[in-house]
Amino acid sequence: MARTMIGQPAYVLHARPYSETSLVVEMFSRDYGRVALMARGARRPRSALRGLLLAFQPLEVAWSGNGEVHTLTKTEWQGGQALLSGKALLCGYYLNELLLHLLPRADAHERLFSAYAETLRRLAENPRESDLRVFECALLRELGYGLTLEHDADGLPIGPSDAYVYEIERGPVRAEGHEPTRLVKGKTLIDMRDGDFSDPRSLAEAKQLMRVLIAHYTSGKDLHARKFFMELQEL
């Protein structure tokens, strides 16, 4: 028997063409996580869905069916979210890529859904790099890859002035003979724990650490938004 879901808050993560008239839309829903929905007729010129299935806009959707791809049966725009542009738009695409690569389908994460919505709101107001770091930490924590930031790998408290190397699956290890580029100050780890990126050094070191961790958990997949942003910085 086909299952029916109604009144579900969701965001569009990605859409790809399917046949001449339809789309397969990857959505991040509040109670069912990432879902793939068939939007029949969405590519037709007069389809009402064309103006609704926009990324970064809060929607309420309904779907039905079994299997991996369900059928989208209703879409309503909820409003309240400003359109992203410029740097904010690129940051939004980066968030979506992270969710597409790391979030399994049908794995609900209500707190992560709220964090995503809040990050979009912040990006629309004033895009800041610190918002991306906060979301990255929230994403890894929700998926069970949370960083060890309370103590080092030996169970000792993090020393703000000490230098560490963060070993994946183990945690911070006091630096002894490691390459300087891999080092992270204890203060950075503490600031990451507290979500405080007001210190430029903490922000820079957190960015490098998160890049290594995300590359590991995505099996080294290229993130197009990050690559594009780096190319813009070079220009």
Image (cartoon, helix red, strand yellow):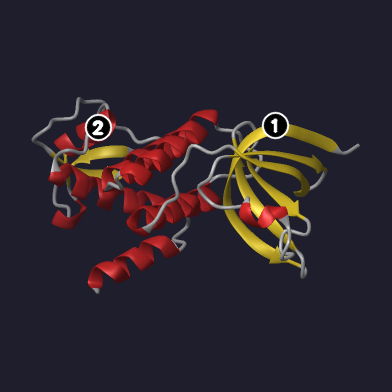
Position of 72 compared to 230: left or right? right
Point out the tag, 1 or 2, that comes first from the N-terminus.
Answer: 1
Q: Tell me which amino acid carries mark 2.
A: Asp
Where residue 58 appears, as percent x and y from the top left, is 55, 40
- Could you say which is closer to the camera, residue 47 or residue 43? 47
Position of 54 compared to 184: left or right? right
Where residue 3 appears, as percent x and y from the top left, is 83, 36
State the residue lying farthest toward the left: 161
Above or below 193: residue 174:
below
- Could you say which is closer to the camera, residue 16 or residue 171? 16
Residue receiving disc 1: 7
- Could you say which is closer to the camera, residue 76 or residue 137? 76
Task: Write down the quadrant of residue 235 in the picture.
Answer: bottom left
Above or below 134: residue 127:
below
State the residue lying farthest toward the front: 46
Residue at image x 70%, y 57%? 24
Q: Tell me which amino acid carries mark 1.
A: Gly
Q: Secondary structure at mark 1?
A: strand
